[in-house]
Structures are given as structure tokens and as C-alpha cells.
Image: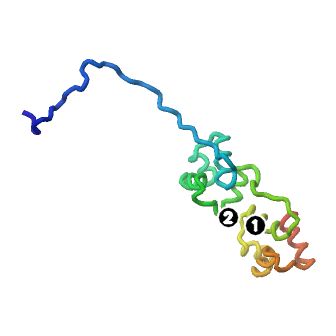
Amino acid sequence: MSPCPGRRLRTVVLPFCHLILQARKPVHREKYPDFLRTWGDYIKVRRLDLKLTKRQLSLNLNVSDITIYLWERNKVKPSLAQIPKIIEFLGRDPFEKETDNLAERIKDFRRVCGLSQKKLAEQLGINLSTLEGWETGKHQPTKKLLDKIKSALVF
């Protein structure tokens, strides 16, 4: 007698069917982004072109594979310190723009090199508020400082 009335133990559901179904597991192919707007979009396209897994890329960039996932899903942006390695991985700066505007060129240089305003100001030997003023366009550097900037920024 079974412990639960009305239930059968070890009953074969289809005793007359002796088929074994076999099939390959479908290959999941990641989709390319429709438009390239963010760092995550550019990273994903480059990773897929190189046929790298998120894990392989994370080891290359020295971040976790979760970080790669979050970048590619546009949940978070890469930090300023990670931008130089990402640009190296991409082979170019996707957001580089041609400009003669000194403020924009300073900002671009900082981004590409992964420098904060404070670090660049220290490297140039100037006050942080001076650099902030240049980047906002509130004032222009003197001829002497402009030469120093040009040599530091490799114009």
C-alpha cells in the first residue's frame, strides 16, 4: 500500500514510447547594438568583432566580468581611470572631436589620459581653480602657460 492514497509510485507514464529526444543546444548569439552612442556600445561591438567573451575582456582590462556586463548594458559608465585602457582596446577614441577650442582640447586630453582636473593641475604646476577656469572658458591662459599646456598636451 502506498503512503499516500491515490498516488502511484514508480509508474512509467508512457511505457509504449521508447524514443530518446536529442538535439543540440541552440547557440546564443549576442546582438550588436543598433547605434553606437555610449562607451558600452563601442566596447560590445569591438568585443564581438574580436570574438572575445566578457571574461576574456575583463581579464584584459583588469576589471570584473560583471563590470563589462554593466558597461555593455549601459547601466554604468567606465570611470575616468579606465578610459585609457578602453581606448587602447578599441584602437581609437570614439568620442574624439576635432576642435580648436582650448577648453575642449584640455577636457579631451584629461579624458584620454584618465586624469582628474586636480592631477592635471598638479602636473602643470597650476592652481586647480585656474584649470577649471580654462575648461569652462571663463579665462584664458597667459602666453607662458599656453606654451606649457601645448607641450604637456602634445598639440
Amino acid of disc 1? Arg
Left or right, residue 97 beside residue 147: left
Q: How far apart are marks 2 and 1 (CA)?
A: 9 Å
Amino acid of disc 2? Leu
Instruction: Give residue 110's mark.
Output: 1
Q: Pinpoint residue 67: horizontal percent, then vertical percent.
A: 57, 56
Residue 76, above or below 9? below
Q: Pinpoint residue 77: horizontal percent, then vertical percent.
A: 62, 60
Q: Quadrant of residue 19?
A: top left
- Quarter holding the N terminus is top left
- Name the residue at 90% across, 79% down: 142
Q: How crowded is mark 2: few (under 14 residues within 10 Å), some or many (20 or more)?
A: some
- Name the residue at 64% across, 46% down: 33
Instruction: Give residue 80's mark.
Output: 2
- Quarter holding the C terminus is bottom right
In this orientation, which residue lies closer to the viewer: 79 or 15?
15
Residue 103, above or below 63? below
Q: Pinpoint residue 87: horizontal percent, then vertical percent.
A: 72, 54
* Numbered-mark total: 2
- Name the residue at 88% across, 73% down: 148
- Name the residue at 75% across, 61% down: 112
Q: In which quarter of the image is residue 63?
A: bottom right
Mark 2–mark 1 CB contact (< 8 Å): yes
Q: Quadrant of residue 23?
A: top left
- Here the colouring is rainbow
For mark 1, give the secondary structure. Answer: helix
